[in-house]
Amino acid sequence: MMLSFCLAMFLSTGQNKSHAEVSNTKTSADFKDLKDVDAKTKALVDKWLSKGVMHGVSEDRFGLNETISRAEFAKILAIVVRLKVDTLLKTSRFKDVSVNDSVYGYALPYIEALRKAEVTDGVEFYSFDPGSMVTNEQLAIFMLRSMGYDREARETSGITDETVSNYAKGHVALASKLFPSLITDGPYMGTTPIQRQIILLVLEDLTVTTYCGCSPKETTQTLKL
């Protein structure tokens, strides 16, 4: 695995935004639904807004408790782990991912970047299902693959938790050890959609880990995700 120079570069540069872009960046104070949240959460929101990683669900609502689509998370993950993204790309292997999609078309280059890095192979060979919500177990798998831990996860004894799908048990077991944001005292609730609030914590985990996902390719067969 490669050391995390790419993540360190991301954190220090803030994606090299122009002065105009920085000036127009929203803060937690711009969202009405964040008025009464705690200072720590506001600080995390401000951090990832300033880097252009996360955005609100509308002009005045951040949507901490709302779910997040696979398309939106694909963009967030590809940016954070510094995958090479061809923003001019117009086609995808996935037949349900189209640049002409008025809702999810923006995510095509990021989805393809994740596919080429073998972070995802879709729910089927020709299907990514961009509009579906990211679940807890999908999140664990995305995180591990993006950091190059897919092989270790396949070799990890699966978690004993009936709420987690069989294909994800090893990944959830390892992710729960590596990422504090995924630790839970009760059932993992693997098939339950995550809320956007957890993404704030997940991003912290991804950017303090020892290894980066610049080259997360594995020689073993890729799980559908």
Image (tube, rainbow, N blue to C red):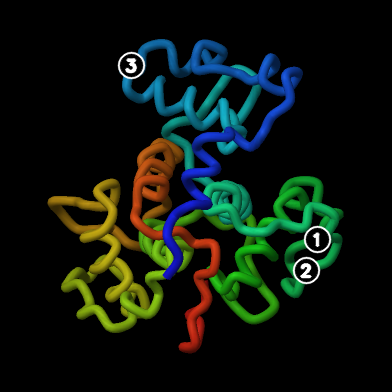
Mark closer to the observer (1, 2):
2
Residue marked by disc 2: 92
Q: Secondary structure at mark 1?
A: loop
Q: Quadrant of residue 65?
A: top left
Say what amino acid the circle numbered 2 marks.
Ser
Whole-angstrom CA distance, mark 1 to mark 3, is: 39 Å
Residue 22: give x, y in percent of width and height: 67, 20
Query: Which comes before the other along the chain, label 1 or label 2?
Result: 2
Numbered circle sitting on residue 98? 1
Give the SS element for disc 2.
Answer: loop
Determine contact: label 1, label 2, CB under 8 Å.
Answer: yes
Mark sitting earlier along the chain (1/3): 3
Could you say whether the residue bearing mark 3 is in a helix, strand or loop? helix
Q: Give the quarter of the image for residue 64.
A: top left
Q: Residue at x 60, y 48 (%)?
A: 79
Quadrant where the image shows the N terminus: bottom left
Q: Position of residue 94 (x, y in %)?
A: 72, 72
Q: Is disc 1 surrounded by few (<14), some (14 to 19) or many (20+) residues within 10 Å?
A: many
Q: Residue at x 26, y 67 (%)?
A: 174
- Identify residue for label 3: 39
1 vs 3, front mark:
3
Q: Which residue is most to the bottom?
A: 220
Give the class, few, some or many, for how many residues have Cα within 10 Å of label 2's Cα (few <14, many ≥20): some
- Alpha carbon distance from label 2 to label 3: 41 Å
Badge 1 amino acid: Ser
- Counting every numbered tag in the picture gives 3
- Sequence-first tag of 2 and 3: 3
Residue extending furthest toward the left: 185
- Identify the residue at horizontal 24%, vertical 78% (top origin): 156
**Amino acid carrying mark 3 in the image:** Ala
Q: How far apart are the two marked residues, 1 and 2, measured between alpha carbons?
A: 7 Å
